[in-house]
Image (spheres, grey):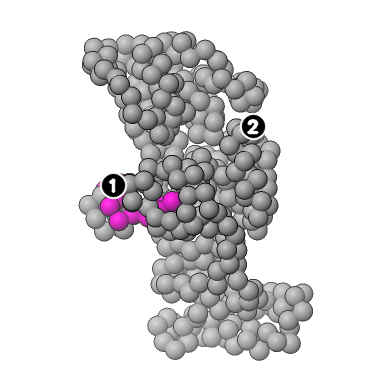
Amino acid sequence: MPSELFREAAYFFGDLIQSIKQGVFSQKAAEIVRFRYEKTAGRVGGIWDGSLMENPRFREQLLFDKPYKAVMIRAPREAVIQSFGVPELKPGEVLVRVAYAGVCATDLEIFEGRLGYYKSGIAKYPIVPGHEFSGVIVATGARVTEFAENDPVVVECIQGCGECDSCRNEDAIGCASRSEVGVIGRNGGYAEYMITPARFVHRLPPSLTLKHAILCEPLAVVLKGLRRLGWNASNRMLSRSAVVGGGPIGHLAALTISHQGADVAVFDRNPDRLAYLARRGISVEQDLQKIAAFDTIIEATGDAEALDTVLERSRTGATILLLGLPYARRDFSFESIVSYDKTIIGSVGSTAADFDEALRLLPHIDASAFFECIFPFEEFHQAWNIARSGKHLKVVLEING
Ligand SMILES: [Zn+2]
Ligand SMILES: [Zn+2]
């Protein structure tokens, strides 16, 4: 308790100084005193549900008493910056001030109306996109004890109900009532603030910056895929493995395998992407016909033609992990899978355990190639155009960096 009181005192003086800096000291001082008194009284007395319970929205309103901005995709091809009031937190939720958000192909598919979830009706407009983001906790709802103000965090994308059979088996992707941040039913990280249940939040290790932390979500996706290939902490060597596609997912897959000391080759047509990887000692190849030399193939393009070549050219006994989307409908005879003892594994999204693993691994990976193109988030349309051009490995939006 003394350390909590000390922290409350530090926030109290911090808020007063902030109000002086913003020139609102005379209007806000009394409110700041009252808020901090109520919060401290609540902590000391344990009066979580009584009249002195803190209003988590209150502190934000004290100093940031203005609407916040977010990119709202209202309908296909209709995205605008929209203002929101700082929202009321439900018990168990936290308010995150977003620092950086990565632009993902999924964001563009939502904007362009091409994402399967929107076609099938699982997801609906309007939505604030962004599932690859980092930020800082600025307020916690009642009954949130594991996080505090100023904690730097990332947030899981796939958020299961927590109660159905799938969720109990840690398989949130099978949860019919799941949300996916920035995709299905929960507004994402293209915003100054976002709200999430605290149970999907992960604190950053001290060695990881908020900027690099945006790679946590795509790295977790890679780690789940590798796990489904039978790759685990004690058995990390994949025999003769190749990654098809040197985009963000393929790049992270190659860096991860190589970080563990295993050989990996990356196939891509884009010489710039290959050059990045070659500089990190990873073998690179442009001719996909040469895929026949590999036992384990990680397909990360989502491209139907590349998949055709992989299925046809891969050797007897090959295992093929599909990490891309959408592949499209193809005519394909599965006889060749049966006749050549091949294995095909699909994988999508990630779990809490994959996020934890990604947070451990990320500080050890040289991800500098991902941060060559950073836009202020108001220029999201331009950022999307650059992302579409494929010139950069990742386009990043800086929000409260
Ligand atoms: Zn993504
Ligand atoms: Zn569920």
Q: Distance between the residues labelled 2 and 1?
A: 35 Å
Please say whether residue 223 is one of the residues in the magenta stretch: no
Res. 35 in view: yes
Residue 242 in percent (x, y) is at: 46, 20
The secondary element bearing badge 2 is classed as: loop
In the picture, measured across the screen, residue 220 lies left or right of residue 364, that is left
Residue 14 in percent (x, y) is at: 69, 74
Residue 284 in percent (x, y) is at: 57, 17
Kind of residue indicated by mark 2: Lys
What residue sits 49% from the left and 44% below the top?
112
Residue on which the image places disc 1: 174
Residue 271, above or below 73: above
Res. 7 in view: no
Residue 391: give its label.
2
Q: Nearer the viewer, mark 2 or mark 1?
A: 2
Q: Which of 146 and 85 is in front in this view?
A: 85
Query: Magenta residues?
Result: 168-184
What residue sits 25% from the left and 19% below the top?
334
Quarter where residue 343 is shown: top left
Q: Nearer the viewer, residue 375 or 123?
A: 123
The secondary element bearing badge 1 is classed as: helix
In the image, the residue with mark 1 has its CB under 8 Å from the nearest atom of ligand 2: yes
Label 2 neighbour load within 10 Å: few <14, some 14-19, many 20+: few
What residue sits 52% from the left and 66% below the top?
95
Q: Which of 108 and 86 is in front in this view?
A: 108
Residue 290 in percent (x, y) is at: 47, 10
Quarter where residue 115 is shown: top left
Kind of residue indicated by mark 1: Gly
What residue sits 48% from the left and 64% below the top?
195
